[in-house]
């Protein structure tokens, strides 16, 4: 029963729609109707304000990503590495990506996943951030480099000799985030673009359209753009 309680807690805390709530409270907007339609950091940055990104990151890293691990290790005394404990942070990522509070819509789970790695395998988090930042600095394209960084996590896990549970945890994180990119909150496909092209863009660019600015700056029709 304690383990079941941990898993329910992990999903529900992960499902707290932090960016959505900030959009509602700060700007009075539904982030799902703006930009990428994603309830996450990028949309928050462009449509609510960059200063709120700090609050988002702190909450998602330490509360959504960290608390399932703290509860499992220090309150329930679960061993690490163990499958029983690894399931809890995975469920936090699932909750973030498919939140019961938003009819199973949500964010991409990158920040929450990073928070879980901070407390499970900080060396892997450092490698993830290093590859992502270096790639972005060279190309100014975050979508493909986030994907590359995620795909390399299992390889880094093997190279660094971490327990096999951590390696499979990294594989699971990759699968969850790739799946979320492809379904993209079940938003309809843009008119005039083939399905294969949209799915390619979603997977590698993390957007439906080729043009980044056109995609990220979308607003509902009739919206005063000076108010967002």
Image (cartoon, grey):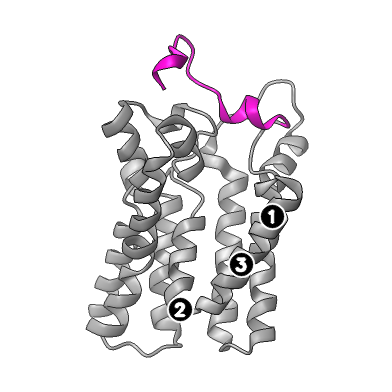
Q: Does label 3 or label 2 sit earlier along the sequence?
A: 2
Instruction: Give the structural element (helix, strand or loop) at label 1.
Output: helix
Q: Is residue 121 above or below residue 130?
A: below
Residue receiving disc 3: 128
Q: Residues within 10 Å of mark 3 (few under 14, many from 20)?
A: many
Closer-to-camera residue (190/218): 218
Name the quadrant containing residue 160: bottom right
The percent coordinates of residue 116 (x first, y second) are 44, 69
Q: Residues within 10 Å of mark 1 (few under 14, many from 20)?
A: many
Q: Is residue 33 left or right of residue 133?
A: left
Q: Is residue 215 magenta?
A: yes
Give the Cα distance between marks 3 and 1: 10 Å
Instruction: Give the structural element (helix, strand or loop) at label 2.
Output: helix
Report the quarter where the N terminus lies: bottom left
The percent coordinates of residue 84 (x first, y second) are 40, 82
Give the Cα distance between marks 2 and 1: 22 Å
Residue at (42% x, 32% y) in the render: 31
Q: Is residue 204 left or right of residue 226?
A: right
Residue receiving disc 1: 145
């Amino acid at each position: 029963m304690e383990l079941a309680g941990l898993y329910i807690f992990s999903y529900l805390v992960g499902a707290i729609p932090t960016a959505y709530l900030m959009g509602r409270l700060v700007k009075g907007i539904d982030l799902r109707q703006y930009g990428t339609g994603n309830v996450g950091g990028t949309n928050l940055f462009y449509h609510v304000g960059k200063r709120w990104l700090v609050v988002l990151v702190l909450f998602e890293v330490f509360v959504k990503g960290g608390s399932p691990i703290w509860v499992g290790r220090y309150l329930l005394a679960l061993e690490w590495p163990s499958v029983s404990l690894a399931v809890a942070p995975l469920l936090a990522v699932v909750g973030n990506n498919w939140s019961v509070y938003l009819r199973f819509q949500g964010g991409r789970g990158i920040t929450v996943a990073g928070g879980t790695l901070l407390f499970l395998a900080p060396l892997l988090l450092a490698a993830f951030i290093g590859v992502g930042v270096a790639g972005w600095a060279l190309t100014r394209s975050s979508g493909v480099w986030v994907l590359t960084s995620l795909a390399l996590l299992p390889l880094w896990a093997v190279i660094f000799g971490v327990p096999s549970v951590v390696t499979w945890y990294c594989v699971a994180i990759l699968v969850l985030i790739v799946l979320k990119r492809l379904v993209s909150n079940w938003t309809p496909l843009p008119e005039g673009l083939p399905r294969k092209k949209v799915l390619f863009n979603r997977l590698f660019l993390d957007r439906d359209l080729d043009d980044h600015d056109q995609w990220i700056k979308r607003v509902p029709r009739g919206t005063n753009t000076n108010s967002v």
